[in-house]
Image (tube, grey):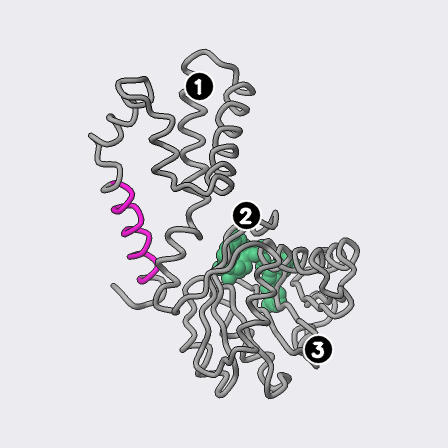
Amino acid sequence: MISFIGAGSMGSAIIRGAVNNGYDAKQITATTKSRESSVQLSTELGINSFSLETDPNANVKAVAGAKMVVLGVKPYQILDSIDEILDSLQSGTIVVSVAAGITIEAMQERLPGKPVFRVMPNTPSMIGIGVSGVAAGKHCDQQHIKQVVDLMESVGEVIQCEESQIDALSTISGSGPAYVFYFIEQFEKLAIEYGFSPQQAAVMVRQTFLGASELVVQAGSSPEELRKRVTSPNGTTEKAIEVFENSDVHKIFSEATQSALKRARQIAGLEG
Ligand SMILES: NC(=O)c1ccc[n+]([C@@H]2O[C@H](COP(=O)([O-])OP(=O)(O)OC[C@H]3O[C@@H](n4cnc5c(N)ncnc54)[C@H](OP(=O)(O)O)[C@@H]3O)[C@@H](O)[C@H]2O)c1
């Protein structure tokens, strides 16, 4: 049985992916704060769900017999949730946190000897095409890793990495969808400035991002090769790319991700 403590945007996305990928809904339990969210989860996905609103002991009850517990509450609630459920966990229960900024060490202190994972998914996980970083704690063996990787693969691709790389992964794939939304916003504004309707601008830009992303995945060529193929010497695309290059876009991207990384370290209390 897998138990989710907190099943909002991210927790429910993972549950939905798991159920769609053949996990038995009856073997999944989830808790939420409100009764309404809990009823919605059980109605939509057929899982067992409990709310704290109807039962203050919901979290404790939900983890009884679980072989894996996924903590899907907000980062500031993670350690309190561990304290709450600690005595009800079986000796070999895997504990997975999807929270930003909460270290394996902080969780491990409260869960001595237990297999603990830190996982960083991103929002496209909600539609089954996410990317998750998976970092294992010191008591995790290959069987534990396989179970967590299998679960996260139900909502997309998995990158196994060291915990020291999780913040860097987060600045690329965790925050990445927001960067892409930002670029889409900019291009849509430009299309409107060139006289297209907002609807036309949306189709033009979103389909371009979708098509180009799919092409780079399917083509088996590097993005650089694909870019060069559509960039004729002295053609229009080349003129646009020259402007990006002259503005040192790589440096701008580097500064942006460094800034995100610095903030991640501040949140984790590793930097002032
Ligand atoms: N959303 C993302 O894109 C994303 C990406 C990577 C990582 N994460 C991580 O995922 C975690 C959850 O984020 P989220 O965006 O999914 O938040 P969310 O939508 O607010 O979900 C939080 C869930 O926890 C429930 N909850 C609140 N207090 C609880 C308690 N004491 N015990 C049990 N359940 C409780 C909430 O119940 P109600 O539904 O009744 O409010 C809700 O189901 C965070 O730690 C975040 O860092 C999120």
Asked if labels 2 and 3 touch by Cβ distance under 8 angstroms, the answer is no
Q: Determine crowd level at label 2: few under 14, some 14-19, many 20+ residues with C-alpha closer than 10 A.
A: some
Which mark is first along the chain, 2 or 3?
A: 3
Which quadrant would residue 50 be assigned to in this image? bottom right
Indicate the secondary structure of the residue bearing disc 2.
helix
Asked if labels 1 and 2 touch by Cβ distance under 8 angstroms, the answer is no
Query: Is residue 84 found left or right of 139 in the rendered image?
Result: right
User: Of the residues shown, which amino acid type is indicated by label 2?
Assistant: Pro
Q: What separation in Å lies between label 3 and label 1 (alpha carbons)?
A: 54 Å
Q: Quadrant of the C terminus?
A: bottom left
Q: What separation in Å lies between label 3 and label 2 (alpha carbons)?
A: 31 Å
Q: What residue would you read off at disc 1?
A: 191
User: Of the residues shown, which amino acid type is indicated by label 3?
Assistant: Lys
Residue 72 lies, with reference to residue 199, above or below; the image says: below
Indicate the secondary structure of the residue bearing disc 3.
helix
Q: What residue would you read off at disc 2?
A: 124
Q: What residue would you read off at disc 3?
A: 61
Residue visible at 36% across and 32% down in the picture: 227
Q: Determine crowd level at label 3: few under 14, some 14-19, many 20+ residues with C-alpha closer than 10 A.
A: some
Ligand 1 is located in which of the four quadrants?
Answer: bottom right
Q: What separation in Å lies between label 2 and label 1 (alpha carbons)?
A: 25 Å
Q: Which mark is residue 233?
A: none
What is the span of residues highlighted in magenta in the rendered image? 252-265
Residue visible at 31% across and 49% down in the picture: 257
Q: Position of residue 151 (x, y in %)?
A: 61, 64
Q: Position of residue 43 (x, y in %)?
A: 79, 55
Q: Nearer the viewer, mark 3 or mark 1?
A: 1
